[in-house]
Image: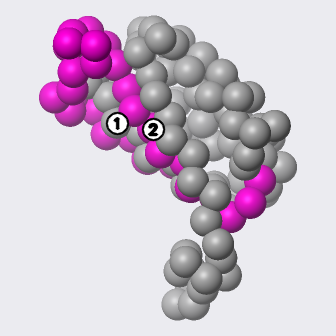
Amino acid sequence: MPQLSLTTNVPVDAVVAADIIKDCSRALARIIGKPESYVMVSINGSVPMSFAASEEPAAYGELMSIGGIGPGVNGKLSAALAEILETKLSVSKSRFYVKFDDVKGFNLGFNGSTF
């Protein structure tokens, strides 16, 4: 169950948010190799944020998944997500951090249970 949360200081309207969510969901499923029906993506725009002492467009992401991520995959995910944010929000790739968290199934609840 990959879950990506994105936060940015760039205003994000509903149409742009829908495009980003769709593009990120497809990229995560393709790169991680999990069905898109398990992927969750959220984006929160217009958040006060400073990066390198500047309030120019920036973004932060956290990706949590039960497996499917690691040294061989994280670089591909980072590149794909950065490309989407640069294209859709004009956030430079050099102003985007993403944190990866490979969780154990018993630490994630779904459908009233754990994995």
Q: In this view, does 1 lie above or below 10?
A: below
Q: Which residue is drawn at 41% across and 15% down?
A: 95
Q: Quadrant of the N terminus?
A: bottom right
Residue type of the residue flagged with mark 1: Thr
Q: In this view, does 2 lie above or below 50?
A: below
Q: What element carries label 1?
A: strand
Residue 35 appears left or right of 54: right
Badge 1: how crowded within 10 Å, few (<14), some, or many (20+)?
A: some
* Quarter of the view holding residue 37: bottom right
Find residue 61 and name its label: 2
**Disc 2 vs disc 1: Cβ atoms closer than 8 Å?**
yes
* Quarter of the view holding residue 91: top left
Q: Is mark 2 on a helix, strand or loop?
A: strand
Residue 110 appears left or right of 62: right
- The residue where tag 1 is placed is 7
Number of numbered discs present?
2
In the image, residue 50 lies in the stretch drawn in magenta: yes
The disc, 2 or 1, on the residue closer to the chain's N-terminal end is 1
Residue type of the residue flagged with mark 2: Gly
Q: Is residue 93 above or below residue 28?
A: above
The answer to whether residue 1 shows anywhere in this view is no
Q: Residue at x 69, y 36 (%)?
A: 74
Q: Which residue is drawn at 46% across and 28% down?
A: 97
The one of 20 and 114 positioned closer to us in this rendering: 114
Q: Where's residue 20, x and y in %? A: 51, 31
Region rendered in magenta: 40-68
Residue 75 appears left or right of 50: right
Label 2 – label 1 distance at C-alpha? 6 Å
The one of 38 and 50 positioned closer to us in this rendering: 50
Q: Residue at x 20, y 32 (%)?
A: 47
